[in-house]
Image (cartoon, rainbow, N blue to C red):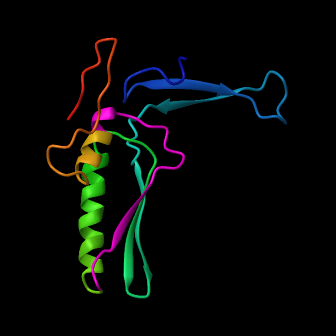
Amino acid sequence: DAFRDGPPGSTVEVVFRHQWALEDEEESVILERKAIRRRDLELATLFSSGDKTIAYLRLSGFSRETAGDANLALRILDAAASQQNGLQGIVLDLRSNPGGLLEAAVQLAAQFAPPGSTLVTAQGRGIMGID
């Protein structure tokens, strides 16, 4: 699609007609394409109930930055929770998460798994296991 394809910094001309305009009245605008970085960590917050404090992270995908962003958010939330009784749990909300880079998901899971844990295995079609 010519509208979307092209490197950042390149331009595309969009021609349009308002619904109230006459049939031969068109306008055009030149748009510059830009790279947009979308964050996968949508929300990081604390929930407290009585003496329990839970960290809540909502992840909308897995990209190269996901594990680092989640780690930073957890350190900040842990520091905030330490003023109370510390963290008693973590919720990773993956609802409506379509996935993304397997390596990013493994990096995130590795933060919670004991060292040396097998996190991913697969067989067939030349797929290799990731530890």
Q: Position of residue 79 (x, y in %)?
A: 23, 76
Range drawn in magenta:
85-104
Rendered position, 61 above or below 128: below
42 displayed left or right of 130? right
Which residue lies at the image location 85% right of the left edge and 36% below the top edge? 20
Residue 80 position (above or below residue 23)? below
> Between 3 and 98, which is closer to the camera in this rendering?
98
The quadrant in which the C terminus is found is top left
Q: Quadrant of residue 129?
A: top left
Compare residues 104 and 109 and report the one nearer the observer. 109
Q: Where residue 58 sits: x, y (%)?
A: 44, 56
Horizontal relation, residue 30 to residue 123: left or right: right
Image vertical order of residue 66 relative to residue 85, above or below: above
Residue at figure coordinates x 38%, y 87% from the top left? 51
**On screen, residue 26 above or below 96:** above
Q: Nearer the viewer, residue 108 or 63?
A: 108
Question: In the figure, residue 122 lies in which quadrant?
Answer: top left
- Identify the main secondary structure in magenta: loop
Q: Quadrant of residue 24?
A: top right
Which residue is painted at 24% across and 43% down in the image?
A: 107
In the rendering, at what x and y percent does residue 52 appear? 38, 81
Residue 118 painted magenta: no
How far from the left and from the top, in percent, is residue 36? 40, 40
Q: Quadrant of the N terminus?
A: top right
